Image (spheres, grey):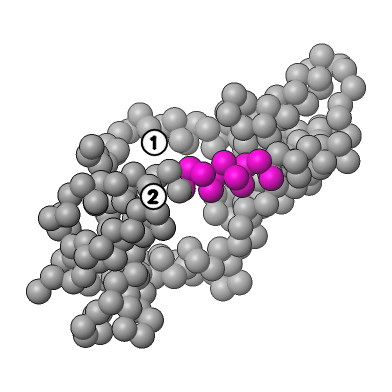
Amino acid sequence: MAITPLPALKSREMITDLMLMAGEAVAIYCSDNEIPVPFATQAPPDTPASPQDLAAMYAYVRKFKPTQVKTQPEPHSGLGLQRYTRATSPLRRYSDLLTHQQLRAHLKGEPLLDIHTISERISQAELGSMSIRKAERQSNNHWRMVYLRDHPKWQGEGVVVAIEGERASVLIPELAMEARVRMKSKPALNSVVKIAPREVDLPDLACYFRVLG
């Protein structure tokens, strides 16, 4: 197997922007017309900042509040939007399908689901979504571990983004993963270190790296 980075295509960026625009437009329309739908919201960090380097960005992202789905529109600070709902993937997300059902009922002049019903369905859907997201993360991590197990001589670069005691948090762009690595000496934030796998624990989905040189 191989791990191949996704190319940075302008078409992919365009689709992402169009999906965000569609979500914002639907959220504005629904809130203006009092149509209950699941709005995606995110409160801003307690201390706003404009990080310029990778370590600062890493620290800032960890201060963000989790995204919440609510029946009333609120700003989504991560996207920089005042109102937003997910509406472009009804085949894979129930909240998107729920939004489509409400829009269709509104346009056909049929009764809408009330806020309490929407809230109940959101709660039920979120429980399933959490399990799905966890399974996806574990699946991605599993195949990273399989790759490293099958390539014991792999060597790559990691960027130091946080330091705690003798260990550093290192981002490994080539593998799209984060690792905690024991350091012989305290490195500088944003410094690049050469690393290699020391041990791969597939059942625990963990890889222990060592610093080269």
Left or right: 70, with 213 as reference point:
right
Q: Residue at x 35, y 53 (%)?
A: 202
The secondary structure type at the circle numbered 2 is: helix
Q: Where 204 falls versus 6 (above or below)?
A: below
Determine whether the residue tagged by mark 1 lies in a helix, strand or loop.
helix
Compare residues 104 and 97 and report the one nearer the observer.
Answer: 97
Residue nearest the viewer, comparing 84 with 151: 151
Q: Residue furthest left?
A: 213
Name the kind of residue labelled 1 in the image.
Glu
Task: Judge left or right: residue 67 versus residue 101.
Answer: left
Quadrant including the C terminus: bottom left
| Residue at image coords 82%, 14% | 108
Q: Is residue 44 above or below residue 184?
A: above
Tag 1 or tag 2, which sits nearer the N-term?
1
Instruction: Specify whether residue 189 is painted magenta.
Output: no
Front-most of 188 and 141?
A: 141
Amino acid type, residue under disc 2 in the picture:
Asn
Give the side of residue 82 with respect to residue 2, left or right: right
Q: Which residues are magenta?
A: 127-137
Q: Which residue is denoted by mark 2 in the rendering? A: 141
The quarter of the displayed image where residue 196 is located: bottom left
Q: Which residue in the protein does label 1 denote?
A: 13
Q: Position of residue 129 (x, y in %)?
A: 62, 42
Viewer-side residue, 29 vs 153: 153
Q: Position of residue 198 (x, y in %)?
A: 22, 65
Dot label at residue 26: none
